[in-house]
Amino acid sequence: MASSPENNASLCDQKVTHSESPQGKKSQQAEEAIFYKNCRAAYLTVLKSSLENIKSKEQLRLVLQQAGRNPSQKTVNKYWTSQTTTLNFDDFCTILKEETPATRTELLEAFRKIDTDNTGYILHDELYKILTTKGEKMTLDEVSAITNLADFNCSGKLDYKKFCDLYIATSEQCCKTALEKLEIDGRLKRQQFGSQGETSTEGITLPVLKPSPKISRKTDHKLAPTKGDSRTPSRPLSAQGCKASVSFTVSMGASSNRNTKLIEPHTIKEWQCAQSRGCFYLEEDGEIISHKYRLHIPQRSTVCITIKPLNLRQAEGKSCHWLSVDTALYVLKENETQENLQLVSFTEQQNKEMFGWKGELASGFYWLLPFTTGCRLKKVKTQITGEAKLVYRGEDSELALTKECRAVLLDIFETIDLDGNGLLSLEEYNFFELRTSGEKCDEEAWAVCKENFDMKKNELTRQGFLDLNLMEANDREGDPSDLWVTLLSLGYNKALEMTEACPFVIDIYAEKCKPRIKAIYLEAGSWQLNRAICKSVVNKGDAKVMDGCENIIVYTYRTGTRITSVIENKSENKVIIHVNNEQSKNCLSNRGLTVFAVEVAPKSMTVSQHVMPLNEQEEWLYNCVHSLLR
C-alpha cells in the first residue's frame, strides 16, 4: 500500500483516554485484551512465534502493516536505529501503542486543509509540491504510487475521498486477515501464551480467559537503543538479569498398575442418590465448554461424588475415543452470592475411569464444575474416506433416517437426557438447542412440538426426537445440511464418530439427606474453575522456588494419571516463563508443544500445563524445566 500523507498533515495526534471509574477500568481491560490479541495476530503473521525477535527494518514494517498501520520510512527509523539489532514482542506492543492508526475523519480533515474550495479533489501538481517539500518529505516515486492509481486519478486530480476509503479499508483488511489466520490455527491462539485464566493470590482475576498484559510505556515514548543486544527491552527489569530456572522430574509407572484409591462405603447403596449427565464439547479454537451444576445439600451429611465418561452403545467397529478422556469435578461452596465461591475439594481419588471424592458437606448450595485437561480431548486431523449417509428415500418415496444416523441420534438423546429418565424436558432440550443453533425453544414453540411429535408428560420421547430431526431434512427436501450442523456441533465427524466431545455422568450419594443437582449453564471454563484448579495444585502439589528469582514459584501436582503445574508470580511485573518438556518420555501435554511460553501477570498465578501419559500401558517420565525469559 502506498505511503499516506498522514505525517505531513499531523494525522497521528490521536490520543486515547480512559475513565477512572470502575466501568471505565473494565472497559480499559477489555480494550487491552483486544489490543493484545491484535498484536499477536499481526506478529504471528510474519514470525513463527511470539518468542521470535524482529530482526530487520523490513520485518518491522511488515508486522506494523499487518496490524493496520502504514509506517513511513521516518516512523520505521524512529524505532530501528543504526544501533538496533532486534526488537522483541513486547517492544512491538509498545510501538503499536505509540503509533495509533489514523481515522477516516482525520485523513479527510488533513486533505481538506489542502482543498480549501472543498471540491473533493486535489490537483496532482499541488499534491506533489506539498508532499515532497513539507513535513516528512516523500519521494516523487512515493507520490506517483498514489496519483497513478486509476481509482483516484481523475484527469490530473486526486479523488481523496476514495483514497481515504481505500486506505481505511486496506488497514482494516490487514488486521482482519491476521486475526483470521490466528483463529484458523488454534494452536497459535492457545499455546504460545496459554489460555488458562490468570488467578490473583488475592482472588482477583482478569475478566477474560486470554492473557491481557499490561503494556509498559517509556517515559520518553521511545525505545532506548544502545549497541548490540544491550538495548533496553520492555520486559520487566526484574527479569532481565535473572538467570533463573527450576526443574521437575517425575517417573510414573504404567497406569494399568496404579492402585485403586476410590473406596466407596459398604452402605452406599442405602444412601440417597442424585444423578446428572453432561458433556464436554470442543470448540473450533480449541476451547472446551461443558455443563455447570448447582447442588443442594439440605443438611450436613457425608457425601460421595463421582464423575466418569458416559458409556454409550456403539456400533461394532466404531471407536470410543471419549472413554479415554480424563474427567474431574471441582466442588465449590456458595456463600452470600453466587460470585463468591470457595473451593471445598475436587475428585482426586480414582477407580479405573471414575474419579471421586468422599467427605462431609455442610447444608447449603454448592457448584459442581466439570473439568478435563484437554490432553486427550483436542483437535486432531483425521482422514475421512467418505461422508456417511444420513437419510434415504424408501420404496414409498418417503424420507427416512439411515440406521447409522438413527443410532447416533439415539446416543445424542442419551447424552442430552440429563436426568436419565428416557425423556427430554424443555430445559434439557434447550441445552441441545443452544449448542446446535444458539437459540432457545420457548413455551409456544414447545407446544407446537407437543402437537407434532411424540411426547409423554410434556417431555419429548426418543421417537419424537428422531422425528423432529427427520423433519429438518424433510423441510429441505432431503438435504441433510441441517442434520450435519447438529452432528458436527455435538462433536461428531463426517464418519459419524464422536471425536470432539466427551459425555459424562455425575453421581452424588448422601448418607443423611436427599441431594439435588441441576444443570445451570453450558459454557467455557469460568474464572472460578481456573482459580479452583490453581488453588488445588498450590494446596496439594510440591512447590519449588525458581533458582535466582524468589518471586517465581512453580507448583507440581500429580495423580496416577496426570500432572498439573502452576506458576505463581509474586512480583510487581509481568513475567514470561519458558517451558521445556523435551526430555519427557511417553508424555502428552494439553499445550500440544514440547517447548512453549507462558505469560504470568503481576501478583497472579496461572496453569502452566497438564500432562498425561501418551500410552497408559507404559511407564512415563515427566521432565520439565521452567526458565525465566530475559
Image: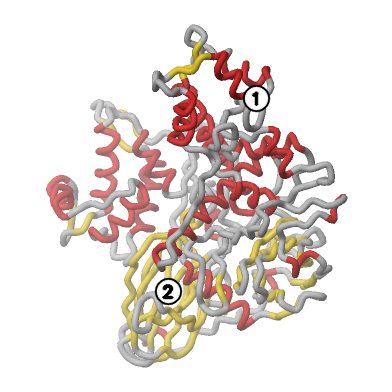
Please state the horizontal and vertical placement of residue 435, each as a whole percent of the image. Answer: 37, 51
Residue 232: name its quadrant.
Answer: bottom right
**Left or right of 577: which side holds 510?**
left
- Residue at 33% x, 46% y is 437
**Vertical placement of residue 45 versus 155, above or below:** below
Of the 4 image quadrants, the one containing the C terminus is bottom right
Which of the pair 476/134 is nearer the observer? 134
Direction right: furthest residue = 228
User: Which quadrant does the N terminus fall into?
Assistant: top right
Q: Earlier in the sequence, mark 2 or mark 1?
A: 1
**Residue 115 appearing in the image:** yes
| Location of residue 58 with respect to 158 vertically, above or below | below
Of residue 91 and residue 592, the one placed in the foreground of this image is: 91
Task: Specify the label residue 105 is tagged with.
Answer: none
Place of residue 416 in the rendered image (x, y in percent of width and height, measured from the top left): 35, 58
Residue lying at 74% horizontally and 39% vertically, measured from the top left: 77
**Label 2: which residue?**
368
Callout in the foreground (2, 1): 1
Scheme of colours in the image = secondary structure
**Residue 179, quarter of picture:** top right
Residue 242, percent from left and from top: 81, 69
Q: Is residue 507 left or right of residue 443?
A: right
Residue type highlighted by circle 1: Thr
Name the mark on residue 133.
1
- Of residues 514 and 395, the one nearer the viewer is 514
Q: Amino acid at mark 2?
A: Leu
